Image (spheres, coloured by chain):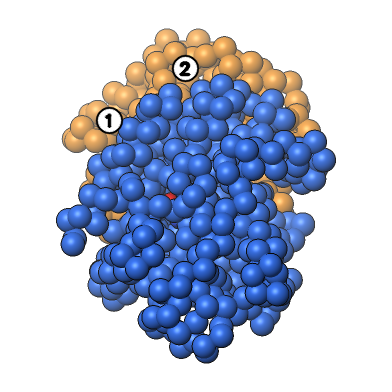
């Protein structure tokens, strides 16, 4: 089988990886595809597409709002998989689907794994899927489908549990950099610094990307000192909400990379 | 057979489907709750507060006029006479004592009707702990007296505007708050919902209701077994408490009543078990009102406390196994029943509770059937709604 695009990315690039998260179907239903194209053109390394859910308990106002809008636009798992197929016609960077469990469960978890891989996505993140339930019941399926299944670790996660999650996670590990819900933060906090430092010393099997609160050049670059890269979500979605994304997306990504302090 | 298993499941329902950020909190609760609750000094403290602060045991009252009308021996379990006016205080006393033993210093809660919010604000005042209550903006408006009570008790009430601005949305916001304050905060969840161990913990705290019913029936009827126990079901905590010690006594018929809103087929309903499918919300697998795409449907009921699209996983299991019969009552039927109880027994029930009474005329009783109605709360908070309707 071909090497998974996520594995390939981390094999080729160890630092300053930039992954961008946005809600599929926002601001308009079919914008998902054009945004992916613009992100690749702007030099982003990976794309995470959010499957909207009515009750996103780990998300702040910006992503909540984008979910409400995407749902009313008619976004669902089936439509998203169609869009992933269209994205794959033009976009070569890894694509990861991220969403709460219930919409996926209604689609059928097993079917979701196979259809997601077949559509051309490379990994999934299901934050409310328990690690042990996945390991016991679904790990084999995901492997068979050739899909990476990425799990979260947080500042409150013990070293011991981080190692366990690292064992089960494939592709990379998603570090929730702060105790909180998604949303841009202006300042990079001491808590974030301490947690990422702790992670960087654990010598984990998986590469690590840090998300939650990363919104500007300063926070993106600070994160990159400790882990392999960062995930930017709310700040980008806020930009999309303002409409018109040709030049804007390019400028936003340039802004993140400005004065890059941590070189390869 | 109806107890939660080691993994936190009731049959296929339950579990802890939570993002990693909440894992340490839930794990801390899971590993400690039974030890703490079984500890003699905890039980001592809990029982003492139930007696001297909450006013337990609550009476089991023989309702002569209702009995005559419906042709059965109808008893009312008077949870409305608990301090703060509903069964909710049984749970909040238990949880705040538990939170203290876990070293927590702040309390958050969600509330629909405001009864759980008031009960939480009350125990926080008692223990000198800061208290934040999330409440949907719609509910803030329709349950004004309770908002005023919470504020008077020193709690901060935060109106929630997302979604339909009701109980589900308030619960989302409380969970977000907990994710943001994982170390020092305990979330006193208000019903038998949420990730394991909350449903089991809340059911155990509320089980004092059926414990008392058994003792009281021995004295009044000569044996502990009623023929029927009837309770309304929002998340299902008062029903869980009233059913708990009868679950294994299969000859006791247990009936839960959900809110049908404007009618089961109207698209404006909160009758989860009648309309839902298995799904995951607020950290547990349960029956859930949702679209084919897995988006949670906005529920509707005149009663803020029943206006929830899910139900506790215990009830989903009791539904699936057929141990409990679930019925529903519309807004109209509930209001009419509430008025009837007010005028025949001199007790104004909460709108939530009124739903339970609305099924009395749908059941066929034998003359000497013993029927226990769980009168979960009093209706002072609902005077505005009742008055508009009369
Ligand atoms: C008086 C009363 N009864 C019932 C309920 C419904 O909750 P549960 O189903 O958890 O008992 C409420 C909730 O607010 C209530 O205030």
Q: Is A46 displayed left or right of B349 in the figure?
A: right
| Residue at mark 1: C-beta within 8 A of ligand 1 | no
Q: Quadrant of residue A197?
A: top right
Q: Which chain is blue?
A: B
| The quarter of the picture showing ligand 1 | bottom left
x, y percent for residue B238:
53, 58
The residue beneath circle 1 is: A239
Q: Establish if B258 lies above or below B167.
A: below
Badge 2 element: helix
Q: Callout 2: 10 Å neighbours few (<14), some, many (20+)? A: many
User: Label 2 is found on which chain of the structure?
Assistant: A
Say which residue appears at 43% left-offset and 34% top-offset.
Answer: B133
Of the pair A114 and A198, the residue shown nearer to us: A198
Which label sits on residue A5? none
Of the pair B322 and B215, the residue shown nearer to us: B215
In the rendered image, is residue A8 in sight?
A: no
User: Label 1 is found on which chain of the structure?
Assistant: A
In which quadrant will I find the C terminus of chain A? top right
Say which residue appears at 80% left-offset and 45% top-offset.
Answer: B38
x, y percent for residue B99:
65, 32
Q: Is B12 displayed left or right of A53 in the figure?
A: right
x, y percent for residue B280:
51, 58
Say which residue appears at 68% left-offset and 67% top-offset.
Answer: B219
Q: How many marks?
A: 2
Q: Earlier in the sequence, mark 1 or mark 2?
A: 2
What distance separates the C-alpha of mark 1 from that of mark 2?
Answer: 17 Å
Which label sits on residue A219? 2
Q: Which chain is orange?
A: A
């Amino acid at each position: 089988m071909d090497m998974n695009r996520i594995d390939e990315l981390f094999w080729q690039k160890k630092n300053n990886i930039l992954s961008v998260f946005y809600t599929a179907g926002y601001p308009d239903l079919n914008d998902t595809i054009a945004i992916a194209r613009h992100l690749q053109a702007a030099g982003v390394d990976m794309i995470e597409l959010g499957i909207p859910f009515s009750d996103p308990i780990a998300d702040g106002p910006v992503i909540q709002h984008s979910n409400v809008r995407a749902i009313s636009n008619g976004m669902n798992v089936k439509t998203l998989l169609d869009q992933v197929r269209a994205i794959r016609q033009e976009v070569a960077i890894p694509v990861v689907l991220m969403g709460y469990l219930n919409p996926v469960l209604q689609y059928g978890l097993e079917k979701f794994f196979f259809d997601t891989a077949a559509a051309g996505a490379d990994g999934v993140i299901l934050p409310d899927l328990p690690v042990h339930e996945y390991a016991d019941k679904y790990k084999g399926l995901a492997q068979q489908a050739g899909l990476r299944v990425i799990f979260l670790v947080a500042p409150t996660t013990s070293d011991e549990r981080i190692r366990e999650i690292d064992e089960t996670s494939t592709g990379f590990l998603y570090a929730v950099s702060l105790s909180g819900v998604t949303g841009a933060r202006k300042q990079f906090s001491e808590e974030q610094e301490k947690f990422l430092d702790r992670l960087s010393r654990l010598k984990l099997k998986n590469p690590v990307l840090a998300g939650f609160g990363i919104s500007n050049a300063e926070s993106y670059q600070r994160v990159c000192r400790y882990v392999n890269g960062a995930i930017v979500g709310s700040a980008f979605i806020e930009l999309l909400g303002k409409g018109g994304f040709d030049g804007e997306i390019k400028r936003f990504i340039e802004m993140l990379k400005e004065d890059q302090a941590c070189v390869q | 057979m109806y107890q939660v298993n080691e993994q936190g499941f009731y049959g296929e329902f339950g579990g802890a489907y939570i993002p990693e950020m909440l894992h340490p909190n839930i794990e801390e609760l899971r590993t400690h709750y039974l030890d703490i609750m079984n500890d003699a000094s905890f039980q001592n403290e809990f029982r003492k507060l139930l007696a001297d602060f909450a006013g337990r045991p609550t009476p089991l009252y023989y309702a002569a006029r209702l009995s005559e009308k419906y042709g059965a021996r109808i008893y009312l379990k008077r949870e409305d006479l608990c301090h703060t006016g509903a069964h909710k205080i049984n749970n909040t006393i238990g949880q705040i004592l538990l939170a203290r033993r876990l070293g927590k210093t702040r309390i958050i809660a969600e509330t629909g009707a405001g009864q759980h919010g008031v009960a939480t604000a009350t125990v926080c005042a008692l223990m000198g702990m800061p208290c934040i209550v999330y409440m949907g903006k719609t509910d803030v408006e329709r349950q004004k007296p309770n908002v005023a009570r919470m504020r008077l008790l020193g709690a901060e009430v935060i109106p929630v505007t997302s979604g339909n601005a009701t109980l589900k949305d308030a619960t989302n916001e409380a969970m977000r708050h907990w994710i943001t304050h994982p170390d020092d905060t305990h979330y006193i969840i208000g019903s038998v919902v949420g990730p394991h161990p909350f449903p089991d913990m809340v059911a155990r705290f509320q089980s004092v209701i059926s414990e008392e019913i058994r003792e009281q029936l021995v004295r009044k009827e000569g044996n502990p077994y009623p023929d029927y126990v009837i309770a309304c079901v929002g998340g299902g905590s008062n029903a869980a408490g009233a059913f708990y010690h009868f679950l294994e006594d299969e000859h006791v018929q247990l009936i839960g009543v959900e809110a049908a809103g404007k009618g089961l087929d109207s698209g404006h309903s909160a009758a989860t078990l009648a309309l839902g499918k298995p799904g995951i919300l607020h950290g547990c697998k349960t029956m859930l009102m949702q679209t084919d795409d897995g988006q949670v449907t906005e529920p509707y009921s005149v009663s803020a406390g029943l206006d929830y699209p899910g139900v506790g996983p215990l009830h989903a299991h009791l539904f699936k196994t057929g141990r409990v019969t679930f019925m529903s009552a519309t807004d109209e039927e509930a209001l009419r029943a509430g008025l009837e109880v007010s005028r025949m027994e001199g007790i104004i029930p909460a709108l939530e509770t009124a739903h339970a009474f609305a099924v009395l005329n749908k059941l066929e009783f034998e003359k000497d059937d013993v029927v226990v109605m769980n009168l979960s709360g009093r209706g002072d908070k609902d005077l505005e709604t009742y008055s508009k309707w009369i």
